[in-house]
Amino acid sequence: MSYISIASISEAVCTELKHAARGYFGKSAKDLSIGESAMLAGLLKSPNNLSPWHSQEAAVNERDFVLGRMVENRKITEEQAKEEVK
């Protein structure tokens, strides 16, 4: 894959995330909480099935999974993850 293709894909993903932040949470992507960001990241696996509009329970479960992986990869602390699931 060429650099231009990767750059185009990256730009498209960023644009979609900005729209998703507005659509799901009514705010700018830069203003999302860790938990909100984790929920959007979880949507990538299955946008229809994991949408909070389709299944709040599935969306929350996937968000929690993403938060757990963030802890495992030392991107956030256990305390930060616990704060987001309240």
Image: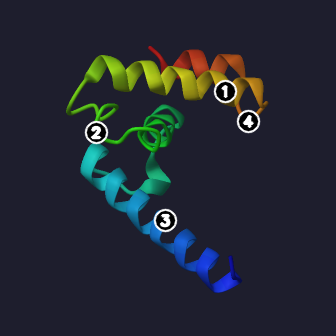
Front label number (2 vs 4)? 2
How crowded pointer 1 is (Cα within 10 Å; few <14, some 14-19, many 20+) is rated as: some
Q: Is residue 68 left or right of residue 45?
A: right
| Residue 74 image point, x, y percent | 79, 30
Q: Which mark is residue 14?
A: 3
Determine the CA span between mark 3 and mark 1: 21 Å
Q: How many marks?
A: 4
Front label number (4 vs 3)? 3
Determine the CA span between mark 1 and mark 2: 22 Å
Mark 2 or mark 3: which comes first in sequence? 3
Location of residue 5 (image quadrant)? bottom right
Front label number (2 vs 3)? 2
| Residue 68 image point, x, y percent | 63, 21
Location of residue 40 (image quadrant)? top left
Determine the CA span between mark 2 and mark 3: 19 Å
Q: Type of residue at label 4?
A: Lys
Which residue occupies the foreground of this view, 79 or 70?
Answer: 70
Disc 2 target residue? 48
Disc 4 target residue? 75
How crowded pointer 2 is (Cα within 10 Å; few <14, some 14-19, many 20+) is rated as: few
Which quadrant does the N terminus fall into? bottom right
For the point 57% across and 15% down, the residue is 82
